[in-house]
Amino acid sequence: MSVKPGTASDLFAGPFALGTLSAGDGPAFPALVDPHGQVLDLRTALDEPGLTVRGLLERWPDVLPRLRELAADTGLARRPLADFRVLAPVEPRQVFQSGANYRRHVIDLHVAHRDPSDGRSEEEARAEAAEIMDRRAAEDLPYVFVGLPSAVTGPYDEVTLPSWAAKPDWELELTAVIGRPAYRVSVEEALEYIAGYTIANDLTDRATVFRRDMPQIGTDWLRSKNAPGFTPLGPWIVPAESLGDTGDLRLTLRLNGEVMQDESTKDMIFDVARMVSYASRSARLFPGDLVLTGSPAGNGMHWGRLLRDGDVMDASITGLGAQRTRCAAEEA
C-alpha cells in the first residue's frame, strides 16, 4: 500500500484527518482533509489567521466537536489535496522514542546474537527469549528515550543519508500524538490524553548506536537517530476516536517495492497506554508531543540490506495513510 504525494487521502480511518500543508513554498497552514482528498483551510474556517496544528492540539477537547461539524458541512469551500505540498503534520515540542517493543523482533535479535559455542539449538534459544519477553511484559518497564524535533521531516520529503552514516536503517512506528498535558498519568487513563495517531519512520544509523571510544557509556541516540530528516512523519494525524482500538493495526514497510516489515501491533510487548503512561511518569508531556511506540521485525540489519542512495521507502499503518520517502546520499 502506498500513496503519491497529494493524490490520495482515502487510506485513513474516519471522516477527517488533520494535516499541515503549504501551497508551494508558501506558509504552512493547518488543514482538515476528507477521505476524498479535499482540503479545508482551518485558518479560514475557524477565523484564526495564525493557527497551527499544534495550536489546535493545545485545546483539543474543546476544538474536536467543531472539527466534526466542519467535516460534515458540505457547503464549505474546499480545494484538492493535489494543489498542496504535504508537510509533517505537527511541530512537536518533544519526541519520545522507544525500542525493543515488538516481541518477534526482540526474539530474533536474541537468537541472532546468541553464543554459538553454548550448544543450544535455535529452537532452544528462541524458547528462552520468549520466556524473557513474557516476564518483561508482566514485570518490567518500556524502554523510552528522547529524540529531537529537528529530525522531523515531511512524509514525502527526500531524506539525506549523512556521509558519516555507514549503516542507515528504517524503523516504521505507530506514533501517538498527545492532546492534553500529561504528567504521572495511570495506564488506565493514558488513552484519554491522546488526540490521535500518525506514522513515523525512525531512521537509525546502526554503526553509531554504540559508542566505540568508551563502551561503558552505552548507546548514542543523538548521533545515531537525530540527523536532519531522520524522522519522516505523517502524512496525517487521525483522531483517536476514528482509529479506535490500536491493538491490531498492520505496519508495512516496502523498500523499492519489496516488503521488509509486515507486522501487527498485536506483537507489541507494551501497548500504547503503557508507553504513554510510562513516559509521563518521568517527564511532562505537552499537546503535540510524539510518543513513538517501537518498530517490528524486519529492519535492514535483519535482512543484511541497509539504506543507500536512490532507495524508496513506502510505509503504511492501518487507518493512518501512507508515506513515501526517497533517500539521497550526502556528498562527502
Image (spheres, grey):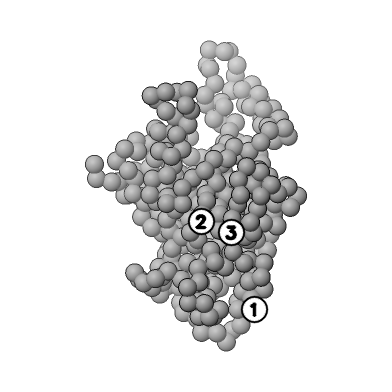
Q: Which mark is residue 92?
A: 2
Look at 63% across and 38% down and name the residue there: 142
- Tell me the quarter of the image containing the C terminus: top left
Q: Nearer the viewer, mark 1 or mark 2?
A: 2
Q: Closest to the observer: 101 or 300?
A: 101
Name which quarter of the figure residue 301 lies in.
Answer: top left
150 sits to left or right of 128: left
Q: Closest to the observer: 268 or 297?
A: 268
Amino acid type at circle 1 is Glu
Circle nearer the N terminus (1, 3): 1
Q: Residue furthest bottom?
A: 75
**Label 2: element kind:** loop
Residue 170, can we see it?
Answer: yes
Look at 56% across and 62% down and name the residue there: 237
The image position of residue 31, as x and y in percent, is 51, 72
Look at 64% across and 78% down and name the residue there: 69
Q: Which residue is mark 1?
A: 69
Mark-to-mark CA distance, 1 and 3: 22 Å
Q: Which residue is mark 3?
A: 287
Circle nearer the N terminus (2, 3): 2
